[in-house]
């Protein structure tokens, strides 16, 4: 009986499922977009670590090895950290957090990430009218 209470006479449902428009979880609690961000950043760190070492030790194989190791560590360690940070927050929290940090730290890049649309005012908020 309870499974049919949301079905109307014409066969449509009378509610919108809560998780219908959410991105599916792919790996370790990360969505596909978050996984790409995590892989890209950790791969860049692996490249920045492996390139000088491959030059010092005169072997080119260290650069791609460090990239692969960096991505693996980034997904498993960084994914776990990001999953704990995201817990209980809205779906767009990560993107707004990155947008805000780029806007505050690098004002010249704010136009590229639409940071000018964010409210970045600091100060005290008042709700009373000024007495004149």
Image (cartoon, rainbow, N blue to C red):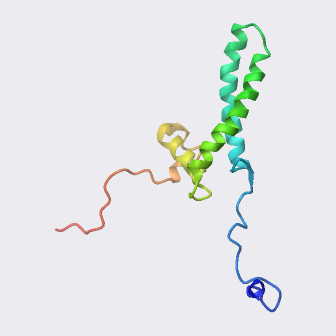
* The N terminus - image quarter: bottom right
Hey, which residue is sitting farthest front in the picture? 1
Residue located at (69% from left, 33% from top): 73
Q: Which one is nearer the viewer's eye here, 9 or 74?
A: 74
* 114 w.r.t. 88: above or below: above
* 56 w.r.t. 125: above or below: above
Q: Position of residue 109 (x, y in %)?
A: 55, 39
* The C terminus - image quarter: bottom left
Q: Position of residue 28 (x, y in %)?
A: 70, 47
* 20 w.r.t. 67: above or below: below
Q: Position of residue 31 (x, y in %)?
A: 71, 51
Hey, which residue is sitting farthest left in the picture? 132
Q: Is residue 79 left or right of residue 97?
A: right
Q: Position of residue 15 (x, y in %)?
A: 70, 80
Hey, which residue is sitting farthest bottom in the picture? 9
Residue located at (68% from left, 29% from top): 44
Residue located at (31% from left, 55% from top): 124
* 108 w.r.t. 61: above or below: below
| Number of marks present in the image shown | 0
Quadrant housing residue 70: top right
């Amino acid at each position: 009986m309870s499974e049919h209470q949301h079905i109307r006479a014409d066969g449509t449902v009378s509610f919108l499922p809560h998780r219908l428009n959410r991105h599916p979880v792919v790996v370790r609690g990360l969505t596909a977009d978050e996984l790409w961000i995590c892989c890209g950043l950790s791969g860049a760190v692996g490249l920045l670590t492996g390139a000088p070492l491959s030059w010092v030790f005169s072997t080119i194989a260290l650069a791609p090895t460090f990239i692969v190791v960096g991505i693996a560590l980034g997904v498993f360690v960084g994914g776990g950290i990001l999953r704990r940070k995201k817990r209980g927050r809205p779906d767009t929290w990560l993107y707004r957090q990155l947008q805000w940090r780029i806007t505050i730290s690098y004002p010249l890049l704010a136009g590229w990430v639409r940071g000018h649309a964010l409210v970045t005012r600091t100060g005290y908020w008042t709700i009373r009218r000024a007495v004149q």
